[in-house]
Image (cartoon, rainbow, N blue to C red):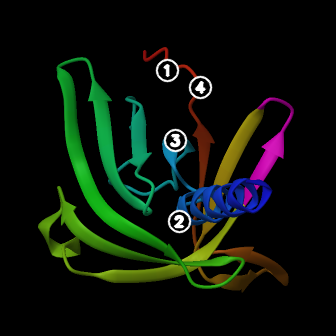
């Protein structure tokens, strides 16, 4: 009986570990906090949300006064501890569909909030190291909208 209980507990722990090991570290909903400034989006006035599933696939939503619409869909796959590969499956800008991007990321815990920071390639400007672009996403616990 003791052996049966030990075997059952071992199987349960192995299966639970397998399930949790397969969940993406990005799982959940994130809100864009600081978009990279470009001519196209410098007047961005509506929230953008990304909802990641347990495998790292996401759907990106724009929440406007006229309703919410899907802006993009992609997979997000960690390659190393600080590098991710993004494959665009759908985008409002059709020229991005099918494209693959590789960039740096980090997840930061600050008090009760969690942030996902993604950054483009490093470059030197006026003798200082910076990046081509940066996005800061806050993990959503409660969404209040506009």
Q: Which residue is mark 4?
A: 141
Q: CB under 8 Å between callouts 3 and 4?
A: no
Lateral position of residue 55 relative to residue 108, left or right:
left
Residue range of the region highlighted in magenta in the rendering: 107-112
Kind of element beneath mark 3 = strand
Q: Residue 110: within the magenta?
A: yes
* In this view, 132 is above or below 54: below
Kind of element beneath mark 2 = loop
Q: Which residue is mark 1?
A: 143
Which mark, residue 11?
none
Q: CA distance from mark 3 to mark 4?
A: 9 Å
Q: Which residue is mark 2?
A: 22
Q: Nearer the viewer, mark 3 or mark 4?
A: 4
Task: Please tell me how many numbered marks the rendered image carries.
Answer: 4
Lateral position of residue 12 relative to residue 100, left or right:
right
Mark 4 burial class by Cα count in 10 Å: few <14, some 14-19, many 20+: few
Disc with the residue nearer the chain's start (2 vs 1): 2
Q: CB under 8 Å between callouts 1 and 3?
A: no
Q: Residue 78: within the magenta?
A: no
């Amino acid at each position: 009986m003791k052996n049966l209980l030990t075997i059952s507990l071992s199987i349960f722990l192995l299966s639970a570990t397998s399930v949790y090991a397969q969940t993406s570290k990005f799982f959940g909903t994130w809100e864009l906090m600081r978009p990279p400034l470009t001519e196209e989006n410098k007047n961005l006035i509506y929230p953008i949300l990304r909802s990641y599933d347990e495998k790292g696939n996401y759907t990106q939503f724009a929440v406007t006064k006229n309703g919410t619409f899907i802006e993009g869909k992609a997979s997000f796959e960690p390659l190393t501890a600080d590098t991710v590969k993004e494959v665009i499956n759908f985008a409002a800008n059709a020229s991005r569909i099918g494209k693959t991007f590789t960039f740096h990321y980090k997840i930061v815990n600050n008090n009760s909030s969690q942030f996902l920071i993604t950054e483009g390639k490093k470059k030197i400007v006026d003798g200082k190291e910076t990046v081509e672009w940066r996005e800061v996403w806050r993990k959503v616990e409660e969404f209040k909208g506009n």
